[in-house]
Image: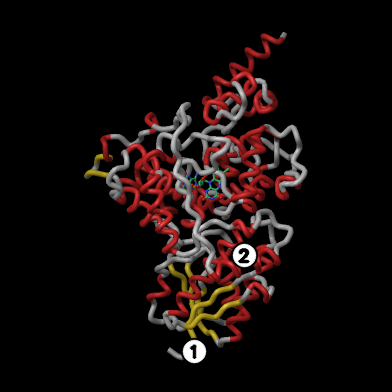
Amino acid sequence: MAGTTAALILATQQFAHHPAYEDPDIDAFLFVESAPRFEALPYHRHKIVLLLAAMRHTAARLEAEGRTVHRIELSEDLGFAAGVERLVQRHGIERLAWMSATDRGVDERLLRLCTRLGLHSRRYEDALFLTTAADIDAWFAEHPRTPMEDFYRWQRRRTGILMTGDTPAGGRWNFDADNRKPLPRGGIDIPGLRHPSPDAITAQVIAEVSERFPGHPGDAGLFWLPVTPEQSRSHLRRFVRERLEDFGPYEDAMAADEPFLFHAVVSPLLNIGLLTVEEVVEAVTGSPGAPLASVEGFVRQVIGWREYMRGMYRAHPDLERANELRLTKRVERWWCTGRGVPDDLPVPVRTVLERVHHWGYAHHIERLMVLGNWFLLQGYAPRQVNRWFLALFVDAYPWVMVPNVMGMSQYADGGLVGTKPYVSGGAYLQKMGSWWGSAREARESAFTDAYWRFLEDNEDVLSSNPRLSLPLAQLRQRRDAAR
Ligand code: FAD
């Protein structure tokens, strides 16, 4: 074939085995580091370091194998499409291949660019998931409003993961009754995470990011994540060896002084291809000693929730603009800068916010029941909340944020993703995380006040939801008692 065929490797597709690497038609690999793209929001500097360091390591690996690599560097200051165009022109590229992007709009922009530049285009299937786009679209077309549990059972049956014939391993689909405990009162040994030391490539990225994005949250010098497939696999193996056993029982637990507990911290890696769903599932289900309740609880998150959220994002594009409760409060600057945080911010919110600024990470129940809960109780506009999560978290991309933030956490969809708003007062937080000095302090906290106020303000809309009948009955009792 005359003329050059190039494969564009997107930032979120740093696979050890990208299909383009095995494609005999590909002559060159393209990487675009777009500084303006990273300036679109105040992205946490660890997220920028992660993406750039992972891309540069992939490019270096390909070069070491003798492949042809063309790159747009951060310092060239080009937008993403302009960067692709520059490479096409610079290197006489006539055909462009890429892996379908998960976020809406990216493929469309690239297709438009190809049409404008007269390039032939070709796409590989998105490999960030176990389920193909066609299969997930077909399932959601048939089940547009079906709960995650049904999707999850379909996934288990279809893939055979944790199945013996048609029967779920252990004879049950769900081990939640064994899970979801607070940490034991007497304390528990929590194995620490090991952070890979930055090599020369990562150190260079850290220096560039510190200089180029001075106003962004997070200290690039404290970057802590794996940036290659090998480092990521070793991080995964450590989780399976040291923390998987206690993942299930404590997946909903919180602790003021412990950011990771028994969580895997694999979403930043899964979401950019450094780990694949297949290898995560294989490592977890192949672990000899781990109890089934933990293994099933973890598999449910990865092949259930994660893929279900992607299906929801594809099936319900309107989710991005939803605002069922018509909330309008703006997210203040201090959420992004971490400076000038009000003194009266409740202790769990303050602690988790500090954690997010430090690590770009908080675990699921902190995202849902501390941050998301507080945003909703305070009446922040859901799209503003979504932008904040998108900017501050190392694993955040629109396909996963929109259903989790707009849907599950902020109830902007009126109960499509979650069946009720995830709100609580201080009592639940105290039970799962001992944030305050005593149960009484928790009950009398600003969190609890905000909870009752939220129910009061939204009583009309929420009263049609059967899952809220108990808290709304309690609200009425409180009102009657106060009369
Ligand atoms: P673990 O607790 O160890 O779970 C294992 C894996 O399961 C995760 O790595 C993730 O890949 C998957 N998973 C579990 N729950 C979900 C879910 N609800 N949606 C998607 N995947 C899930 N996840 C992201 O990947 N990126 C985000 O930006 C993101 N933002 C969130 C915001 C809010 C408000 C909420 C409520 C949830 C969000 N989640 C997000 C889902 C979940 O909180 C994170 O995937 C998880 O905390 C990542 O940490 P971990 O790898 O230690 O997860």
Work out whether mark 1 precedes mark 2 in sequence or the reverse, and give the earlier one: 1
For image coordinates 45% across by 63% down, the residue present is 126
Dividing the picture into quadrants, the one containing residue 362 is: top right
Q: Residues within 10 Å of mark 2 (few under 14, many from 20)?
A: many
Vertical side of 7 occupied by 303: above or below: above
Q: Position of residue 62 (x, y in %)?
A: 45, 77
Element marked by disc 2? helix
Ligand 1 within 8 Å of disc 1? The answer is no
Q: Inspect the image, locate mark 1, and give the three-letter code of the amino acid beneath it.
A: Gly
Element marked by disc 1? loop
Does 99 sit left or right of 437 as displayed? left
Vertical side of 146 occupied by 470: above or below: above
Q: Mark 2 highlights which residue?
A: 206
Vertical side of 15 occupied by 173: above or below: above
C-beta proximity under 8 Å, tags 1 and 2: no
Q: Position of residue 202 (x, y in %)?
A: 56, 67
Vertical side of 28 occupied by 449: above or below: above
Q: Nearer the viewer, residue 480 or 171?
A: 171
What is the distance, in whole Å, between disc 1 and disc 2 at their CAs? 37 Å
Q: Inspect the image, locate mark 2, and give the three-letter code of the amino acid beneath it.
A: Ile
For image coordinates 65% across by 42% down, the residue present is 353
Query: Label for residue 3?
Result: 1
Mark in the foreground, 1 or 2: 2
Ligand 1 within 8 Å of disc 2? The answer is no
For image coordinates 37% across by 30% down, the residue present is 178
Does 445 sit left or right of 134 as displayed? right
